[in-house]
Amino acid sequence: MDTYGLPLRAAAAKVLLAVENGQSLNQCLPPALQQLPPDQRPAMQALCFGTSRWFHRLDGELRSRLKKSLRPTDRVVHHLMLVALFQLRFSQQANYAILNESVEACRALNKPHLTGLVNGVLRSAEREGAPEPADDASRFSHPQWMVEKLRHNWPDDWQSILDANNTQAPMTLRVNARRMSRDAYLDLLKEAVIEAVPTRFAPHGIQLVHPVPVDHLPYFLDGTVSVQDEAAQLCTTLLDLKPGQRVLDACAAPGGKTCAILEACDGLNEVVALDESAERLPRVQENLDRLDLHATLNQADAADTEQWWDGEPFDRILLDVPCSASGVIRRHPDIKLLRRESDITPLAAIQLGLLNAMWDILKPGGRLVYATCSVFPQENHRIIQRFQKQNQDVQPVEPDVAWGRDMGAGRQLLPDPESHDGFFYAVLEKPEA
């Protein structure tokens, strides 16, 4: 996808078209940013993330203003108008600039025959203001299936989950306890005039009042601190790590939890970081290098243990399974566009298969922590219930913690607009032989 030389809105429209065609923002946005001058990159990121966050509301409005859909070959102009509507509804930019520059962006996209349409639609949108949402998808800016599923799964919480998903997630740090205490790092942030507070549940977590570039954080480059959501940090409190243990991070990329494990306990015998993606595994190594930590990296499908396992069982396994990512939508708003309801059942089959495979390589007396960044029970406590029915030797552990909701088989965190993402954890132990 070439966005070189395009105006900012035109480049954003091409990125959003790529998302609609199945690419994540993590895949298609970085190359587009590289083609822009550094001073334009934050604005481009804000356009792409903001338009994705409010896509369903903006798309509902745009469709109500169009007499007929654009041809597939002109679809990029649909996204250009969504970007402009996002700015009209959610930005401080002057309306005349949004309108004029959107028309110019239409020309830059080689669609001069549609400049009149773009101008007319946006002028009426400016004049008339935002319409009343026509349906729940527009009202809550989520796909209809997701609204209905959350309403069914969380009858008392579904609206607060949807509202939390539409907020911008806070920037949260994990202090490397090998290097410094949390209190000492809070003092450093105070000296740097960066407002921050300790997280409620993660013992080494710090939440910034306002996000800052990582290179503004004291001692970031030397590994004193990492960026990681509070909910994701909680895995180390559940693993009960002790020196001499062999630990597996079964779906490790990009490596935040691998590093958290190594920081949490000095003297572990070995930490194996496994991931199926050859593209993402180098990110794990980059994080390890910055923190001056060591793990054994292995590219393989965790479920195919014959392909990679050396026969030596693990004392501890963290199984952070592939999932719908429905608990981290506020950080990845493109999930609303990429995920389908039909994805959930196949994901649940993968999750249960991974759990069975990992159980076979867990040492008797060992502990497995099952984790997802999902809020759908089908991927969470119901997986644990199904697993327990298939395996009589599973001993669930109810952790003594102040966070999350007891689901009878694990604990569920719902996304909190003031702090953590949505996450699920279950702790399972295998009896001694």
Image (cartoon, rainbow, N blue to C red):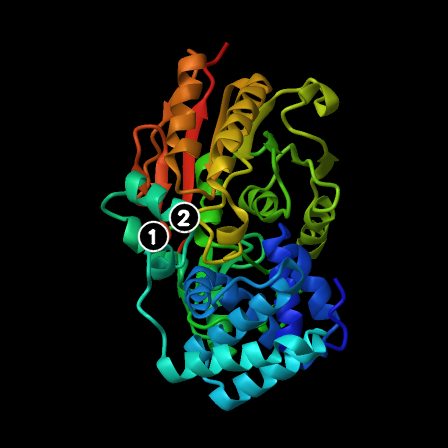
Identify the mark at residue 422; answer none if there is no mark. Answer: 2
Q: Percent from the top left, x then y, of residue 371?
A: 48, 37
Give me the residue at 38% from left, 30% from top: 381
State which quadrant residue 225 falls in: bottom right
Q: Observer-nearest residue: 287 or 114? A: 114
Identify the mark at residue 161; answer none if there is no mark. Answer: 1
- Mark 2 residue type: Gly
Crowding at mark 1 (Cα within 10 Å: few <14, some 14-19, many 20+): many
Give me the residue at 52% from left, 69% from top: 82
| Foreground disc of the pair 2, 1 | 1
- 166 sits left or right of 32 in the view: left
Rendered position, 364 above or below 286: above
Crowding at mark 2 (Cα within 10 Å: few <14, some 14-19, many 20+): many
Residues at marks 2 and 1, CA–CA distance in whole angstroms: 9 Å
- Mark 1 residue type: Ile
Secondary element under disc 2, as helix, strand or loop, is loop
Q: Observer-nearest residue: 368 or 186? A: 368
Marks 2 & 1, CB-CB < 8 Å contact:
yes
State which quadrant residue 197 falls in: bottom left
Q: Percent from the top left, x then y, of residue 19?
A: 61, 56
